[in-house]
Amino acid sequence: MGKTNDNLIVDGKRLDGRAFYEMRPITMRINAVENADGSAQVAFGNTEAIVAVYGPRKLFPRFLQENDRGIMRYRYNMAPFSCTDRIRPGNSRRGIEISKTSRLAFEPAAFLDDFPTTVVDVFTEILQADGSTRVTGINAASMAMAVAGVPMRDLVAACSVGKIQGQLIVDLNGIEDNNSEADVAVAMMPTKDRLTLLQMDGVLTKDELFTLLDKARENCMRIYDMQKAAIKNSFKQNPDAEAAVEADKGEMQ
């Protein structure tokens, strides 16, 4: 979608009717991919991501292994049908960049040093794109990794914030993302109050950036609560899975 000259704010509201600091409806579920070690599906409004995680498992061929730590491979991909203009299948420069930054968002959280010579594979597929795809994928990947039993210091929660027509906003949709004065992707470990990703495109003043970071933190805490609730509710329906996770926690400690 290209730039538009239309107003993005009408009568004090955004085009989708939201207030400036209002997020879109969020849905989350786990075990979305049956044959994965862990999986999750997350939607922020019309943006939807599904993630499958495999590992930690032994990495082959051996020359790829790290003797003192495990490694994480993160693949972000937009399905050809995910947006109005059909996307060419295969790697793109944007997909490679988002894959790398998303992986870096998880490296402070995962205990990869405890699993030398292994790999954790994270496959993120964007099923429908309407802005904020990378943070939607990160939220789903965090849940999928937890379900897979990948030991982590904390879940990683992520959201987008930005600026349109002089107004600071949260959770950018597609038209806002494409026509923003600035957009910022934020990921953090909420209980540690530690940022793991801060990526900005555009221009903000120092005060604007700090205001948006405060809003991002508030939203990440809300998302974090939803992540935990989705995982716990699923385990209530499957006591064996809950027992397995508790066992993993005991081993990690």
Image (tube, grey):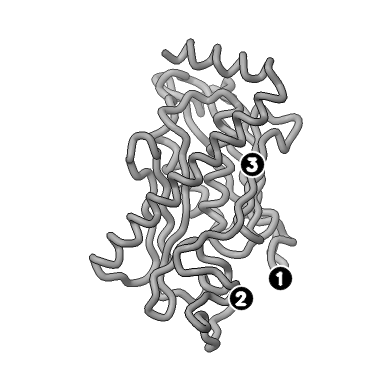
Quick one: label 1 or label 2, which is nearer the N terminus?
A: 2
Badge number at residue 4: none
Query: Where does the image place residue 174, in percent across and percent down from the top left?
Result: 58, 69
Query: Where does the image place residue 220, in percent across and percent down from the top left?
Result: 44, 47
**Residue most extreme to the left:** 206
* Residue hosting label 2: 1
User: Is the residue marked by circle 1 packed among few (<14), some (14-19), or many (20+) residues within 10 Å?
Assistant: few
Quick one: label 3 or label 2, which is nearer the N terminus?
A: 2
In this view, the residue in front, 219 or 6, is 219
Dot 3 falls on a residue whose secondary structure is strand
Task: Kindly check if marks 3 and 2 are in contact, taking CB atoms under 8 A apart as contact.
Answer: no
Dot 2 falls on a residue whose secondary structure is loop
Dot 1 falls on a residue whose secondary structure is loop
* Residue hosting label 3: 51
Quick check: 21 above or below 156? below
Q: Amino acid at mark 3?
A: Val
* Residue hosting label 1: 84
Distance from Cα at disc 1 to Cα at disc 2? 8 Å
Q: Amino acid at mark 1?
A: Thr
